[in-house]
Amino acid sequence: MSERAAAVTDPRRPEPHGLVLLASAVIVHDVAQQRVLLLRRGPGAKFGQGLWDLPCGKNESSEPITTTAVRELREETGLAVDPVDLRVVHVIHGARGVEAPTGFLSVVFATNRWHGEPVNLEPAKHSCVAWADTRSIPNGFVSSTRDVLLAYLDGTATMTLDGWPDEPHDT
């Protein structure tokens, strides 16, 4: 019997209060042009309206996290990336989020290989898709995303704890 099934059928084990949302984000880094791809969240976004963000999204059941990253990048920007060209560069563990009252874990990947030209394929969620110069990353980001991007660009922090009391922000 699985541990989850045991938790449901064994009255001595408490029922979990909720599951942690799994998500991915992708830093598309054009090294030659010194730029990264960003999205500006639009008025129809569930959170962070008007703020910059990375292409990102929620994991679907029975989907590897690399598939989530590839799917979300294509759904939002039209860019195609091979999962083998993704490398994990950061992990964000949030205590809570708009769609994650029991917390979220976001795996941030980076790639410098893709196919296609970026377009805004979700205009109801994003007001624009744009390249940003890596030497002048704009302000006004979704919580922790700018710090993650800057950490990637300077090769520092690999994990962010967001919203946890008494925990360091980056490690």
Image (cartoon, helix red, strand yellow):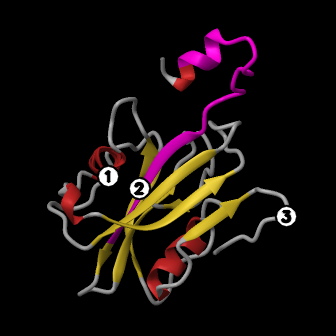
Q: Position of residue 117 (x, y in %)?
A: 20, 62
Q: Secondary structure at mark 1?
A: helix
Please tell me whether residue 139 belongs to the stretch shown in magenta.
no
Q: Quadrant of residue 128?
A: bottom left
Residue 73 tag number: 1
Amino acid type, label 1: Leu
Closer to viewer: mark 3 or mark 1: 3
Q: Are marks 2 and 1 in contact (CB under 8 Å)?
A: yes
Using the image as rendered, state which of residue 68 and residue 146 is in the foreground: 68
Q: Quadrant of residue 79?
A: bottom left
Residue 166 tag number: 3
Amino acid type, label 3: Asp
Residue holding disc 2: 55
Give the Cα separation between the discs numbered 3 and 2: 29 Å
- Looking at the image, is mark 3 or mark 2 earlier in the sequence? 2
Using the image as rendered, state which of residue 150 and residue 157 is in the foreground: 157
Q: Which residues are magenta?
A: 5-28
Residue 89 drawn above or below residue 126: below
Q: Secondary structure at mark 3?
A: loop
- Which residue appears at 57% of the width and 65% of the height? 145
Amino acid type, label 2: Pro
Is residue 15 in view? yes
Give the Cα separation between the discs numbered 3 and 1: 34 Å
- Which residue appears at 53% of the width and 80% of the height? 150
